[in-house]
């Protein structure tokens, strides 16, 4: 275990015995507790907040994610409508399903589980979702609003990362954040959100030359590359905060957790890190969409 921790305010090292583990379950519970009152208010008025999830094909990992989200909805009193489509569904057929959900006043949020089969135009499908029901923050319009800092429903995993930083009062202003990944629903939006919080942001990706050198310069590292144990311990500078947004088979993140522990001041585990906060954020957005639809 490390013999030091980084003092963010003084910019120096001090003695300690172990890094701080950023508990995603604690953050998720806090978010859900804040949402429970709105759920009760809606139900008292005869409205049950409803999230519709669309699963195309039979990918077992995607089916597991959809089931986890449905169970989380049930525990909070949110209705979950699950739509399963065969793998051979076309882009046009998928968009028609989405449009029907857009027109259904009883549905407040729409989540298209990704990835979809390769023959489907995923971007066209995402952009078919009404902005008022885009609770997963996947539309082009939602991305643009997020970049400008006023999205009602930013992408859930990036929002979860920011929620963890906020919950544990980890300074972002003026810090150098390195984001590894540039997907339009994770890497790019979290880069924008960190920039909007006055971090200096470097966005890296699979073609970044000397990637480890960028990571070694980071005060905050966000790993969103989709490769197990990709971020090595000797990449991380002493006192860095590491947020692992990866989830690979075997409950393995994108960070080599054990190797990074001796270097970090704070880190999210996998599981029980960013994942539960992502789901809690999705529920929060769904309830907010229902509240807005009812004029609250």
Image (spheres, helix red, strand yellow):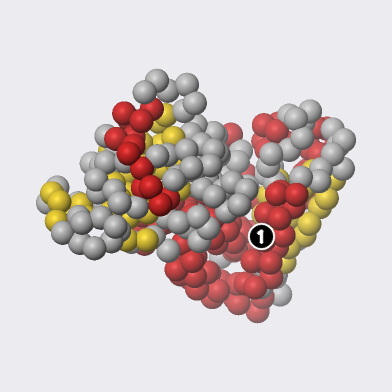
Q: Nearer the viewer, residue 99 or 51?
A: 51
Point 36% across, 23% down: residue: 210
| Residue appearing at x 40%, y 20% in the figure | 209
**Residue 264 percent across, percent down from the top left:** 30, 50
Give the residue at x 24% y 45%. 238
In depth, the one of 196 and 163 nearer the eye is 163
Asked if residue 143 is positioned above or below residue 247 in the image, the reply reads: above
Q: Nearer the viewer, residue 3 or 147?
A: 3
Kindly identify which residue carries mark 1.
69
Instruction: Classify mark 1: residues with Cα within 10 Å, few (<14), some (14-19) or many (20+).
Output: some
> Image quadrant for the C terminus?
bottom right
Question: Residue 231 lies in what quarter of the image?
Answer: top left
User: Where 28 falls versus 261 (above or below)?
Assistant: below
Dot 1 falls on a residue whose secondary structure is: helix
Q: Position of residue 136 (x, y in %)?
A: 60, 48
x%, y% of residue 7? 17, 54
Lateral position of residue 213 relative to residue 164, left or right: left
36 left or right, relative to 93: left
Viewer can see residue 68: yes
Image coords of residue 41 (percent x, y): 59, 75
């Amino acid at each position: 275990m490390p013999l030091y921790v980084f003092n963010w305010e003084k910019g120096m090292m001090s003695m300690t015995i172990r890094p701080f583990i950023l508990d995603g379950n604690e953050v998720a519970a806090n978010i859900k507790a804040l949402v429970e009152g709105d759920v009760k208010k809606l139900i008292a008025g005869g409205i049950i907040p409803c999230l519709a999830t669309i699963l195309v094909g039979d990918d077992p990992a995607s089916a597991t994610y959809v089931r986890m989200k449905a169970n989380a909805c049930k525990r909070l009193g949110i209705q979950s409508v699950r739509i399963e489509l065969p793998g051979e569904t076309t882009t046009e057929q998928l968009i028609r399903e989405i449009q029907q959900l857009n027109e259904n006043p009883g549905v407040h949020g729409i989540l298209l589980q990704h990835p979809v089969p390769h023959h489907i135009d995923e971007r066209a499908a995402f952009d078919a979702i009404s902005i008022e029901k885009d609770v997963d923050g996947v539309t082009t319009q939602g991305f643009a609003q997020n970049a400008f800092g006023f999205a009602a429903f930013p992408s859930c995993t990036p929002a979860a990362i920011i929620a963890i930083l906020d919950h544990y009062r980890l300074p972002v202003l003026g810090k150098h954040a390195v984001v590894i990944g540039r997907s339009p629903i994770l890497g790019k939006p979290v880069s924008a959100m960190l920039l909007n919080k006055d971090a200096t942001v470097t966005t890296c990706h699979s073609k970044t030359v000397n990637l480890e050198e960028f990571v070694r310069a980071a005060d905050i590292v966000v790993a969103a590359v989709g490769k197990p144990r990709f971020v090595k311990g000797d990449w991380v500078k002493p006192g860095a905060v590491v947020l692992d947004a990866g989830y690979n088979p075997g409950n393995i993140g994108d960070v080599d957790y054990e190797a990074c522990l001796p270097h970090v001041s704070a880190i999210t585990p996998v599981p029980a890190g960013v994942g539960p906060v992502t789901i809690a954020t999705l529920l929060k957005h769904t309830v907010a969409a229902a509240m807005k639809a009812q004029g609250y």
